[in-house]
Amino acid sequence: ARSQELKNAKSSEELEEGGPPGGAGAGRGNAEPTFEEPSAKSRKGNGRGEDADAEKSAEKTAARHKAQGYGAAGKLTDQDFDDIIGRMTKLGPDGKPVVQVSRPAPQPAPEGAEQSPSLRPSPAPDVERKPLQLTTASKSQQKHDVVLQGHSRPVTYLTFDDSGKVLYTCGKDKLVIAWSVPDGECLRKYEGHRGAVWACSVLNNDDGSLLLTCGADNYVLLWQAESAEILCQVELPGVVRCVEWCSHSLSLRFACCCNGFKAKPAAIEVCEFINIQGAMTSRCCASIAVPKLPSAATQVAWAGPYREWLCSVHEAGLVVFWDAVTGSEVARLPAHEDAVSKIAIPHSDGRLLASCGRQDMEVRLWCLARPESDDEESDFDDMGGGKPTPELMRNFTCDRPLNCVAIRPSLTFQQAAAEEQDAEGSCMLLAGGGQDARDVALVGAGTDVDQFEPIPLRFARTSTADSVVPLGLEHYPAEGAWDPKSRKGGHFGPLHALAFSP
């Protein structure tokens, strides 16, 4: 409005002076600027008529939809969309939908114009085109591993209860977690340690399940497994690396090993819990400390037909056997050339012991006491005076450093000593390990993509070339559940704990 007033005033002045509006001086630099009122057409769009073209296109589309019978006033409704999909889809002989592709009819060329043969539209084929089918047979055959995600730091130990329906895992995040098997549901968490939890052990009795845990806070904790309630705690001189119930004892007896701290040496402790007026307390039954102990033990386990021995794992590949009552040394076994990573003893027969070494990458199965008559009714008097006489029964050399080994809980001496094995065979041992995390970070994981998978082993039907004993171990065939290609997922770091379900 202001520009129009200026324009009208300028025109009036020029008329009064006798000069035309577009006369001399018009368009000069010293002339006053003139403004024109924008037209209605220029207010819409960008001034180039695009909105008009859009309106014409929308009108044509609406007219075409109306001609085809879609909706009112040419607008598409949900029913129209269903109708379009129904026209495009047709069921084939096999009952599956077959997509029909419609091509637009060729437009006639203008008179006198020749069309290039390569640009002429090809006629629509008479054969109905089927949708693209993706081959998913290999994916359907893959089995997803049940991944238990509950720990925020590495898992250090795992074990099953006697029923095999509950799995207990320990971690460096100060937690012990109970999982249901096989669905992997988190049942409960045990929070009480003030440092990394290194091991645990479960005992089933008439009053329910009792859980023992040990950790870097120098404590052994006794839990009521079902309620996650702490019943008792035992303090030791240093970091407790291992704890294990004595399953063949009438009392609540357990063994543990701890590191030294300041003036207190590393030791193996045998303790038992006593219920006094409804309250649990503990007392020490035997103690084996340095220098009687060769060095700080990394693992302790009950062995023997009646669990009358304790075996401790030490540096330099040494396994030492002790009398569980008196604490005196009864035998020594140089199990491996270098440090022993782990040992495992089956629950059904304490005469067997499996061990693995990291440096020699070997799994070995030992017989601790061979009876004179290989039957289940043989008496303990046939065991050579009650002292272990370790003997190598079977061995297997792996292709990677080993950190852990597990043995089938139901394995017996008769099965391990049998020369004739079933053609199918069963997985009797599990071994695991892999490169150190430092080596993986510096040089990569290498070409072996399965080095972080567990190694299943069975009893060999014949002696292997690298076996030093008549009977050996062999790799379980990579088929079924043990075939890495049929499984989706897996570990991406070294294994440090393995366990068999009872």
Image (cartoon, helix red, strand yellow):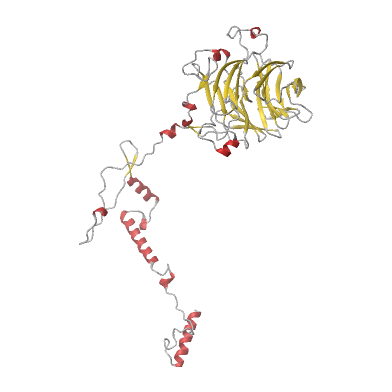
Question: Which residue appears farthest toward the left when viewing the image?
Answer: 112
Relative to the observer, which residue lies in front, 393 or 237?
393
Query: Residue 61, how many percent across, how many down?
Result: 34, 58
Look at 40% across and 71% down and name the residue there.
41
In the image, taking residue 200 as reference, residue 85 lies left or right, namely left
Looking at the image, residue 3 lies above or below residue 143: below
Q: In which quarter of the view is residue 237 placed? A: top right
Q: Position of residue 149 (x, y in %)?
A: 58, 35
**Nearer-the-camera pick, 29 or 396:** 396
> Where does residue 277 sit, x and y in percent of width and height?
77, 22
Nearer to the camera, 408 or 362: 362
Residue visible at 55% across and 30% down in the picture: 183
Horizontal relation, residue 348 to residue 269: left or right: left
- Residue shown at the point (66%, 20%) measured from the top left: 319
Residue 129: x percent and y percent? 31, 43
Which quarter of the figure has residue 365?
top right
Furthest residue in direction right, as rendered: 263
- Residue at 47% from the left image edge and 24% from the top image edge: 477
Q: Is residue 244 visible?
A: yes
- Number of on-image labels: 0
Left or right placement of residue 92 versus residue 413 in this view: left
**Residue 502 visible from this viewpoint:** no
Quadrant of the rendered image containing residue 407:
top right
Q: Is residue 43 above or below residue 186?
A: below
Q: Could you tell me which quadrant the C terminus lies in?
A: top right
